[in-house]
Amino acid sequence: MRISRSFVTALVAFFLGAAVVAQRGQSTPIKPGEECPAGMTEVRPGQCQAPTMPPPSIVDYRPRSTLVVPAHPVPRAKYPAIDFHGHPGDRIMSAGALATMVSELDSLNVGLMVSADNLSGERLRQAIATIAGSPQKDRVRVLAGIDFRDVGPGWADKAVRQLEADVRAGAVGVGEIAKSLGLSIRKRDGSRLRIDDPDLDPIWDACARLNLPVFIHTADPQEFFQPIDDHNERWLELALFPGRRYPSDRFPSFEELMTERDNLFRRHPRTTFVAAHMGWHANDLARLGRMFDAMPNLSAELGAVLYDIGRQPRVAHDFFVKYQDRILFGKDAYEPSEYPYYWRVFETRDDYFDYYRHYHAFWKLYGIDLPDPVLKKVYYANALRLTPGLPRGAWRQ
Ligand SMILES: [Zn+2]
């Protein structure tokens, strides 16, 4: 029998390779369903191996993409947008700071910012006076804050009176009701103030009577309530910001808070609610869709969840088209350089581009390519419809 030279070469290479692996001792078998041991990765089905070099930490690993595809950055929104989730802070407390902020908003084509800084009383009046007395008077509107401390007998009357005074001073809605409602605020009797506590009902009824949208942030991403381990998508964020962890021995669970929130929405069908951050369901849009179907008084704002919208371009596109009357643009933290990422996700069909905050997401974004009529609703028309107190000048309805 003749043995070909190439066969011998292949045989030698095979045994040499096997010898190298055996020598390193790095190949470890696992059973179906098992994970590789720490420090190893699955190189072939059922075979784990350790890198031959010390791996970089996830903090330092920043691979440069070699993908070459068309890119269409969008520095300005296609239509003048209303930022329903603004946190201007002191930028609306003086004429100079207001003018600077509005010139930044001009360059992004943000036509109006809704301040969701929970202003009330004297500070709210100061902000509104600054805005009303400026050349930028139609560029910012202010939501009123509710003080949820000390809820008990007599609280609701006082809170409703304060809200009515804030509305007379020019507030156009309520918010942003903070996540501390549900997570941490205590009642006068020391018990946790539940989001659906009946003691709060007079406030929600007043919002319906005064035609004020209620902008409410409940809980936080569900991973913040989970163990911080190798499977947690927000490991880096939780390691950077320990205050964002909600361990179950000290806080209600994510689902408990969602149940209380949904009870609130259902029990007050005449009150308009806008759930901040898409209710933290941008990672499960079908769930948010079921909520929209069951609760006609509910809309959602999309600030700070772009990482979830942009990683499911087809599902998100279809969701935005189906629920085009229920979704409002908002940005949350004020940072002008970050708005264009939103425009690019909504307006293009670009593939695989960077997000602005690595610790939110270790993945890339894709454009969801919304049709113009949907863009207009998300950018401004839904906010105008839900908030009678907004100036309409810049938008022909
Ligand atoms: Zn906010």
Image (cartoon, grey):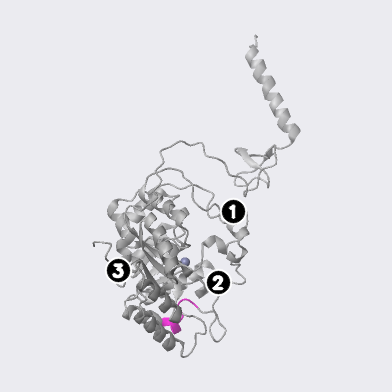
Q: Amino acid at mark 3?
A: Pro
Q: Nearer the viewer, mark 3 or mark 2?
A: 3
For disc 1, the marked residue is 231
Is 20 or 373 nearer to us in this picture? 373
Q: Amino acid at mark 1?
A: His
Give me the residue at 48% from left, 69% from top: 89
The secondary element bearing badge 2 is classed as: loop
For disc 2, the marked residue is 252
The secondary element bearing badge 1 is classed as: loop
Is 14 or 112 nearer to us in this picture? 112
Give me the residue at 43% from left, 37% from top: 69
Q: Earlier in the sequence, mark 1 or mark 3?
A: 1
Occupied quadrant, residue 136 = bottom left
Kindly give the residue lying farthest to the front in the view shown: 96
Q: Quadrant of the N terminus?
A: top right
The residue segment tinted magenta is 194-201
Q: Earlier in the sequence, mark 1 or mark 2?
A: 1
Q: Position of residue 245 (x, y in %)?
A: 59, 65
Above or below, 305 against 351 in this view is below
Q: Residues within 10 Å of mark 3 (few under 14, many from 20)?
A: some
Task: Please check the rendered image and state whether residue 20 is part of the magenta-colored stretch, yes or no.
Answer: no
How far, Cα to Cα, is label 3 from label 2?
Answer: 40 Å
Q: Which mark is residue 68?
A: none
